[in-house]
Image (cartoon, helix red, strand yellow):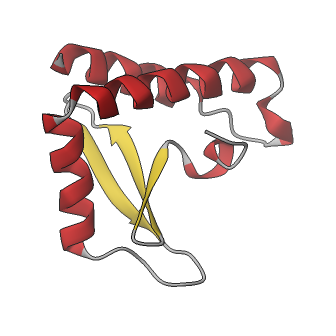
Amino acid sequence: MSSDWATKGAHVHIGGKEVRVYARHDGIIGAEGLRMSNGVPSDAQIRRVVDEINSNADVRSDLIAKSRAAMTEMNAHNWGNSRNRAAEMHFLIRALEGMG
C-alpha cells in the first residue's frame, strides 16, 4: 500500500503490470488493468489476480490489511488528492472478509 492507492485504488502488481482490485456493486471482487508506461496487464494476468484472491486466504488477509491502512490514511489526509477513496476501501474490505 502506498499513496498511489489514492489515485488508482487498491491494486496489485503482476509481471511488472498493475491490476486494480475493487468490490463490485454486487459485493463480488472485480479487477481491471491499469494503464502504465509499460502497458496494461493481459486478460490472463487479470484473471490470475482474481483467482489468487479467490483461492488464497493469505493474499486476502494481506489485501485487507493494506486496504485498512490506506483507508486510515485517506481519512486522515487523503495524500492531497481531490477524490477520497476511503469508502471504496471499506467496501473492498467487506467483500474480502465475506469470502473467508
The x and y percentages for residue 73 are 73, 24
Q: What residue is shown at x 21% (from left), y 15% (from top)?
A: 98
From the top left corner, tell me how far across and down residue 66 is, in percent.
53, 29
Q: Residue at x 83, y 25 (%)?
A: 77
Q: Is residue 40 above or below residue 24?
A: below
**Residue 75 located left or right of residue 96:** right
Quadrant for the C terminus, please.
top left
Figure check: 79 above or below 57: below
Determine whether, in the image, residue 48 is placed left or right of residue 72. Answer: left
Classify residue 97 as left or right of residue 28.
right
Specify the quadrant of the image occupied by residue 29. Answer: top left
Report the label total.
0
Q: Residue 55: give x, y in percent of width and height.
A: 13, 36
Which of the pair 61/89 is nearer the observer?
61
**Most extreme residue toward the bottom, as rendered?**
38
Q: Is residue 46 above or below residue 77?
A: below
Residue at (38%, 27%) from the top-left corner?
A: 92
Could you say where residue 39 lies in the image, as x and y percent from the top left? 48, 83
User: In the visual, does 86 lie left or right of 100?
Assistant: right
Instruction: Give the residue displayed 49% in from the left and 21% down from the top.
Output: 65
Location of residue 26 (image quadrant): top left
Query: Where does the N terminus fall, quadrant-wise?
Result: top right
Q: Residue furthest front?
A: 58
Query: Front-most of 76 and 15?
Result: 15
